[in-house]
Image (cartoon, helix red, strand yellow):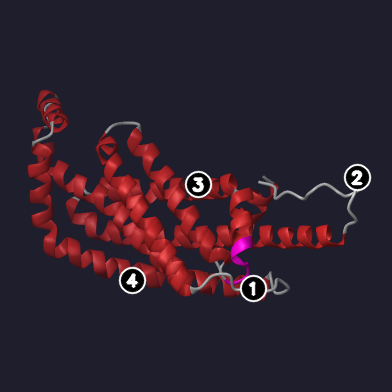
């Protein structure tokens, strides 16, 4: 737990560095332009398709009857836009995650190396292409899980549980590779992931919970259609900031764990064999 808190505090302090704040704007700009264009040109088509699809659901019919019974028949018109907004959230966030993992994370690691981990040897066990391939494969798996769990997103409390869990798993898998690609060998990276799997997953889940705050802002802005574009843009930047903070948190935790692993390895190589050998050092959560 000490390592988690220590890396959290260091990440929070680094997140407000001017260089880190600048790194939030690049994925924000790309995601805003790309997804803004898609939603602008295909909004009517998407909402029409969503409306037709939802009309065939028994759950949707029950919701419509409930709205009618309490005098909110006008809410029928916003269910389809609300559904499109909910569907767009994970796709936009995944876009920002991939941009940060492949473009921003190297800058994060360089800053930390220059300021706090200058003595840590670079063994380059990963590459940019390896990062891209790993990120794409992991994202495809996450999207498959997303599709299979999609019907549960409209049922409390699953809409509040499933996104952070999926997001935690995806973030932990993507960020860990990129955090260690420059400094660790492939074997060192696998060792750290195996030993610290649950703390790393916890960082991902907490990042997902932090991401749920702008998600609520995004979703509820659909009910105020004139403000939706502005709120959506602000929300995308908040996502970018949270993801850069998450990248810093993963980087601090993983690089600190790598330092400990190498100390342990060096001590084991020098220690005499026998009953007096010190116990193996474990990475604390």
What range is drawn magenta here? 182-187
Q: Secondary structure at mark 2?
A: loop
- Along the horizontal axis of the image, is 66 left or right of 29? left
Q: Position of residue 5 (x, y in %)?
A: 65, 49
Q: Which mark is residue 268?
A: none
Instruction: Check disc 2 and report the residue beneath it.
Output: 275
For residue 207, above or below residue 116:
above
Instruction: Check disc 3 and report the residue beneath it.
Output: 206
Gap between marks 1 and 3 measured at Cα: 30 Å
Q: Are marks 2 and 1 in contact (CB under 8 Å)?
A: no
Instruction: Check disc 4 and report the residue beneath it.
Output: 29
The label nearer to you, 4 versus 2, is 2
For residue 75, above or below residue 174:
above
| Front residue (pair 258, 164) | 258
Q: Position of residue 107 (x, y in %)?
A: 52, 74
Which of marks 4 and 3 precedes in the sequence? Answer: 4
Observer able to see residue 66? yes
For residue 4, above or below residue 54:
below
Observer able to see residue 18? no
Q: Residue at x 73, y 58 (%)?
A: 260
Instruction: Check disc 1 and report the residue beneath it.
Output: 123
Which of marks 1 and 2 precedes in the sequence? Answer: 1
The label nearer to you, 4 versus 1, is 1
Gap between marks 4 and 1 measured at Cα: 33 Å
Answer whether residue 186 is magenta in the image.
yes
Q: Residue at x 59, y 57 (%)?
A: 190
Q: Are marks 4 and 1 in contact (CB under 8 Å)?
A: no
Q: Are marks 4 and 2 in contact (CB under 8 Å)?
A: no
């Amino acid at each position: 737990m000490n390592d988690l808190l220590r890396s959290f505090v260091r990440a929070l302090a680094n997140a407000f560095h001017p260089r880190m704040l600048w790194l939030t704007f690049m994925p924000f700009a790309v995601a805003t332009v790309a997804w803004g264009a898609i939603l602008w040109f295909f909004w009517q088509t998407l909402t029409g398709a969503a409306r037709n699809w939802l009309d065939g659901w028994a759950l949707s019919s029950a919701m419509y009857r409930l709205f009618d019974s309490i005098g909110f028949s006008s809410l029928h018109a916003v269910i389809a836009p609300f559904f499109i907004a909910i569907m767009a959230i994970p796709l936009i966030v995944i876009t920002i995650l991939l941009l940060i993992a492949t473009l921003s994370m190297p800058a994060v690691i360089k800053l930390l190396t220059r300021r706090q981990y200058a003595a840590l040897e670079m063994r380059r066990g990963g590459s940019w292409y390896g990062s891209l391939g790993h990120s794409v494969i992991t994202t495809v798996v996450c999207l498959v899980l997303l599709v299979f769990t999609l019907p549960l997103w409209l049922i409390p409390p699953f809409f509040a549980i499933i996104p952070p869990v999926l997001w935690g798993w995806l973030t932990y898998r993507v960020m860990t590779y990129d955090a260690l690609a420059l400094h660790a060998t492939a074997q060192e990276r696998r060792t750290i992931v195996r030993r610290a799997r649950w703390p790393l997953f916890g960082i991902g889940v907490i990042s997902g919970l932090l991401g749920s705050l702008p998600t609520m802002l995004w979703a509820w802005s659909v009910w105020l259609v004139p403000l939706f574009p502005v709120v959506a843009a602000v929300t995308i930047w908040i996502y970018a900031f949270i993801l850069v903070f998450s990248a810093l948190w993963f980087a601090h935790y993983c690089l600190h764990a790598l330092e400990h692993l190498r100390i342990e390895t060096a001590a084991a190589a020098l220690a005499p064999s026998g009953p007096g050998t010190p116990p193996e050092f474990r990475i604390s959560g």
